[in-house]
Image (cartoon, rainbow, N blue to C red):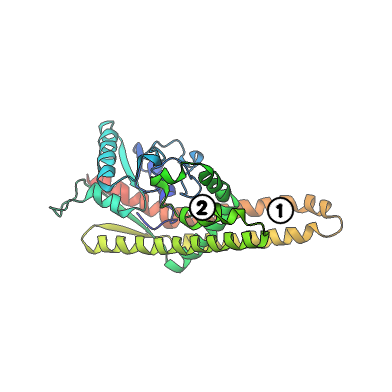
């Protein structure tokens, strides 16, 4: 469990591949259950899944309507039973706490429907919000605008009810319905920039609401193991700042005489620097998040 962007999907795969038991993952993110908008919904990619089977991830047609909590409970419950019947460990991951509560909670009893080990990845909000804003920029750079253009170019986009609440869809609706026809390039750019600003604001608000719901679950008696990933994201932001500084230096380099020769001489150093940053981030993640989480889950399984 945890707010959007805190690393839940990565940790779920780490757990599935590091706890000494075969495991499969059940997605509990409201927007990721649907096909489409993989960038906007931030679905984990095929390579990132490392061969671990995922359930309810991009499986549903958004035109079939919005999945209710009760429908999720039935579908996820069936997946849990199927996974357990094959002797594997079900790992439920996602930020939609209403789905998780529907699957596990019982309104007429304080007892949970399953014996669970809860992991809550927490990140100090200012750090997380900074990261989320940069992640939106990365999503734009890696094709979110093109993905949204394809979504809105379909005559049936309004019927894809399941995806209409995805962050980015309502914020960019005005641009793709009206702003895209604006002849003035500067005006179009202003509309897009305003939409991106709103996406960042709404993403941070979503994260804040999600954390609030998790705190209420913990206060209500759920035994949540809090794992603090703040240092991981500080390291990630630091690495991003270094990369941005290197990119700026490279741009200046290309403007001077003999830029091509300079590029040949420094390319290897930049590649080494990128690898070093990735390695440093991975080491902090392993120390602060992965290792403590694996220990918690292994202890839970041993007690069972």
Which of the 4 image quadrants contains residue 207?
Answer: bottom left
The residue at the point 53 percent across, 52 percent down is 177
Quadrant occupied by the C terminus: top left
Residues 182 and 171: in front is: 182
Residues 143 and 104: in front is: 143
Residue 303: x %, y % from top left: 23, 47
Residue corresponding to mark 1: 269
Q: Which mark is residue 282?
A: 2
**Above or below: residue 256 compared with residue 162:** below
Identify the mark nearer the N-term, 2 or 1.
1
Residue 119: x %, y % from top left: 33, 54
The residue at the point 30 percent across, 57 percent down is 225
Furthest residue toward left: 108
**Above or below: residue 54 compared with residue 117:** above
Left/right of residue 257 with respect to residue 252 in the rendered view:
right
Left/right of residue 277 with respect to residue 246 in the rendered view:
left
Element assignment for label 1? helix
Residue 281: x %, y % from top left: 53, 55
The residue at the point 74 percent across, 58 percent down is 250
Which of the 4 image quadrants contains residue 16?
Answer: top left
Quadrant occupied by the N terminus: bottom left
Q: Is residue 203 visible?
A: yes
Q: Is residue 242 visible?
A: no
Element assignment for label 2? helix
Furthest residue toward bottom: 126
Residues 211 and 89: in front is: 211
Mark 2 closeness class: few <14, some 14–19, many ≥20 residues within 10 Å:
some
Left/right of residue 253 with respect to residue 280 in the rendered view:
right
């Amino acid at each position: 469990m945890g707010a959007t962007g805190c690393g839940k999907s990565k940790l779920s795969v780490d757990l599935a591949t590091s706890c000494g038991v075969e495991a499969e993952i059940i997605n509990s993110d409201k927007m990721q259950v649907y096909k489409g908008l993989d960038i906007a919904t931030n679905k984990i990619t095929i390579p990132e899944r490392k061969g671990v089977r995922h359930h309810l991830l991009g499986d549903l047609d958004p035109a079939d309507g919005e999945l209710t909590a009760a429908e999720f409970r039935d579908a996820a419950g069936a997946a849990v039973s199927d996974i357990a019947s094959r002797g594997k460990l079900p790992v439920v991951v996602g930020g939609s706490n209403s789905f998780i509560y529907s699957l596990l909670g019982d309104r007429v009893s304080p007892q949970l429907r399953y014996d669970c080990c809860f992991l809550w990845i927490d990140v100090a909000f200012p750090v997380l919000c900074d990261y989320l804003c940069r992640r939106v920029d990365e999503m734009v750079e890696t094709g979110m605008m093109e993905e949204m253009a394809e979504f809105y170019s379909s005559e049936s986009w309004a019927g894809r009810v399941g995806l209409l609440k995805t962050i980015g869809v309502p914020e960019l609706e005005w641009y793709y319905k009206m702003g895209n026809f604006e002849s003035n390039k500067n005006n179009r750019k202003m509309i897009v920039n305003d939409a991106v600003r709103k996406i960042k604001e709404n993403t941070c608000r979503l994260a804040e609401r999600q954390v609030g719901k998790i705190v209420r679950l913990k206060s209500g008696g759920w035994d949540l193991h809090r794992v603090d990933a703040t240092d991981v994201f500080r390291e990630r932001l630091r690495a991003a700042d270094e990369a941005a500084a290197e990119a700026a230096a490279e741009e200046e380099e290309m403007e001077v005489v003999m830029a091509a020769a300079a590029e040949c001489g420094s390319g290897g150093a930049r590649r080494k620097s990128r690898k070093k940053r990735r390695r440093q981030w991975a080491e902090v993640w392993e120390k602060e998040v992965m290792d403590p989480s694996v220990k918690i889950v292994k202890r839970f399984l041993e007690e069972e």
